[in-house]
Image: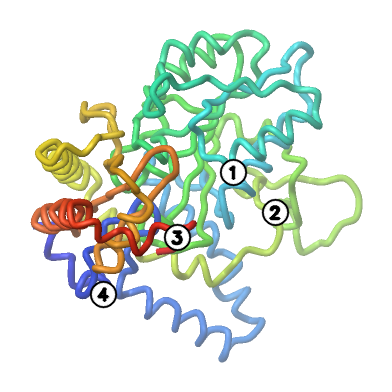
Amino acid sequence: MLLRWRPEFPILQTQNYLISNSLGAMPRRVYDRMREFADRWATAGVKAWVDEWWDLPRRVGDSIAPLIGAPAGSVSMHTNITTIQHIVLSCFEERPAGRTRIVAEELHFPSVLYTTGAWAKSHAADLVLVPSSDGITVDTQQMVDAIDERTVLVSISHVLFKSAYLHDVKAIAERAHAVGARIVVDAYQSVGVLPVNVGELDVDMVCGGVLKWLCGGPGGAFLYVRPELANTLQPRFTGWFAHARPFAFEVGSMQYAGGAARFQTGTPAIPSLYAAIEGPAIIREVGVERIRAKSVHQTELLIRLADRHGFRVNSPRAAERRGGAVTLDVPHGLAVARAMIERSIIVDYREGAGIRIAPHFYTRDDELTAAIETMKEIIEGRIFTTYLNVSSLVT
């Protein structure tokens, strides 16, 4: 029974925690890992690099690889998705003549679009954004039609962060490869809550992180590159950790390491890697298939409860097109979300979408019922008016 894991997450004792699509609950065992880091630094000093730290990025990457169906040695660790996007884009500074387009979706995570747009502007390329007709979904055929022989890279989310819409990645990847383009998929909103297999999806690159559904905290982002592709790429956004002989401190042209290591940059954030170990381990033990089955059940429950009270659902109703969250559009959503948080029901709000509710494998059904009933009470009693002047939501 998945609820037996609840004692492993201390925050669940005091909060109705429904925000795992933003920050997963911290496992109790992370305390031990962070003490382990502090003890190693305090007692071993610089020897910790040789004893453990030097190899830690590879070991954490290999612990995440099974969760995306990737082989060992194909996942590198970084601090955030923005850094990863710079690394990926820098691999395409030299590209075949006529390859001037990057195709993305307008509902992609903004940081990715900021990075991609700036790169395109400075590298004589065009960023083509496929629009959404409803603010919830992006039509697969429109994505496919936007990809042609001018395309060098396709950049999409696996699951859209505002609506939890689940892309048909395989169809989009098939079109990209048919015209000789590469595809990078941001799987931050999918890994850990639904099955992901990079081989079945036939994608070139997948990025994500442990911050959300993997319960690994901030600072642990990952990049998978298809092994047969990896050694053909030469990222310009690079650093000494990507060198084949980093401790030779050679001056001159870059000599890349093989495999995932060639996509590293500078010195890694070791404390974040310690924090990142336990969450993915728990997800592997629980089993993603079991997590997905419960997620489908609980997101369907949320939709039924929302319908009962007349709340607009801004997430796909079909389970096969929905990730792990449900977004509800209610009047004065930001203020209502703040009122819910003050009542220890932890949700969040996204402008233009609504209140996002994200149960995980440790969530009880009655917590979802309580959340929707409390939302109803706040709206009908106009309890949210105290928070109408709140301009942001920090949870």
- Give how far across and how far down residue 315 sits, in percent: 29, 33
- Observer-side mark, 4 or 2, equals 4
Residue at the (52%, 53%) spot, across then down: 221
Q: Earlier in the sequence, mark 3 or mark 2?
A: 2
Quadrant housing the N terminus:
bottom left
Kind of residue sitting beneath label 3: Val
**Residue 390's disc number:** 3
- x%, y% of residue 18? 26, 56
Q: Which residue is mark 1?
A: 111
What residue is shown with label 4? 10
C-alpha gap between disc 3 and disc 4: 29 Å
Tell me the residue at 52%/43% (across/down): 74
**Is the Cβ of the residue at disc 3 closer than 8 Å to that at disc 1?**
no
State which mark lies toward you, 2 or 1. 1
Which numbered disc, 3 or 4, marks the residue closer to the eye? 3
Secondary element at tag 1: helix
Give the residue pinned by disc 2.
265
Q: Badge 3, how many Cα within 10 Å: few under 14, some, many 20+?
A: few
User: Vertically, is 220 above or below 99?
Assistant: below
Q: Residue at x 91, y 49 (%)?
A: 252
- The three-letter amino acid code for the residue at tag 1 is Ser
